[in-house]
Amino acid sequence: MIRLILTAALLLSGTSAMSAPAPQVIAHRGASGERPEHTASAYRLAIEQGADVIEPDLVMTRDGHFVVRHENEIGAATDVADRPEFAARRTTKVIDGVQTTGWFTEDFTLAELKTLRARERLPLLRPANTAWDGQEPLLTFDEVVALAREESARTGRVIGVAPELKHPSYFAGIGLPMEDAFVAALQRHGLTGADAPILIQCFEVGPLQRLKARIDAPLLQLMSVAGGPADRPDLSYAAMSTPDGLRAVAAYADAVGVETGMILPRDAAGRSLPAAPLVADAHAAGLKVVVWTFRAENAFLPLERRRGDAPADHGDLSGYLKAFYALGVDAVFSDFPGAAVDAR
């Protein structure tokens, strides 16, 4: 039987999955449209707004700990650039084929990173969020799991966690392999079972295939409109999203996490085109479908959903979400989980 994901609260309580609210709402890095991403306040706000699951992106420190950041480069999302004691650590690296300049988590110990404070990563689009700059420390994966459990006890509903392993092949290549440390963390928290309130994501293929052999927790293969897995140069996400490709994914994953444009493509002007068959094809392969990422700003919305001309102005996010809900998707990632809950 196909495991139902993202309904951990219902599975753990014994409630019938048929009564589960669908689709589920995953708070993308917390309520990151309203607070600096990956902060405790962003996660707590998302839960207050009704999110079913919170998402931490995982990167590694020099001493092998998981910290929660969008990328291992942290120049824009922390105050590290203002810290003279770390100025000499600014460098240029190639991450999954992309040359990037800044400060990288793998060049810091956890103790050093804990001295930094989070900042809004998109201040031009989300200037109101800068009011929280400098107020909160960087979180570890353990701390996010603890937060989810504290909020579960407070609210009386199980809050799931959807960690994404970021750049695992890159980290393995610099002597910081993620998988053993990640499995150890899952075991420590009792999150390896099929009914665990967790959904493990990755854009790469190999890590998910290897995790499949080690744990029973739900796994999600991420895909984007362009490109392919960093660890599989022979594969493209376009090929993986075909019926044959989806059947291959179903051999090791429970779900696919696809970019909005893979379901509702856009034309050259940015207007939505008719829906692609991906949702039906994935369901036919036995996969759940999770869609990323729903944001309110015009900069991220298709032309017909924009309101006004300013990229930072908010458009018709509710209508856009409802269009995907009507197509039968199983879950959505949103920077504005409150809007996703309301539209549902």
Image: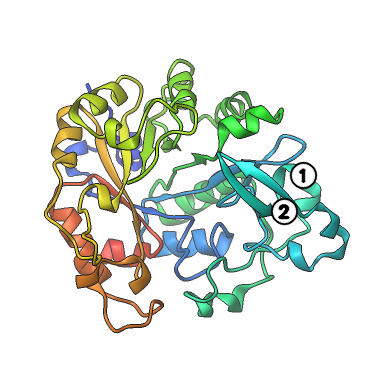
Q: Tell me the quarter of the image containing the N terminus.
A: top left
- The secondary element bearing badge 2 is classed as loop
Q: Quadrant of residue 273?
A: bottom left
Looking at the picture, tell me which residue is in the foreground, 60 or 21. 60
Name the residue that disc number 1 marks. 107
Name the side, left or right, on which 179 lies relative to 272.
Answer: right
Q: Looking at numbered disc 2 in the image, what kind of residue is underneath it?
A: Trp
Q: Position of residue 173 (x, y in %)?
A: 66, 28
At x 57% / y 33%, what residue is drawn?
168
Q: Is residue 344 visible?
A: no
What amino acid does circle 1 point to? Answer: Asp
**Label 2–label 1 contact, CB within 8 A:** yes
Left or right of 171 on screen, residue 265: left
The residue where tag 2 is placed is 103
Q: Residue furthest top?
A: 213
Q: Seen in the image, is 303 located left or right of residue 54?
A: left
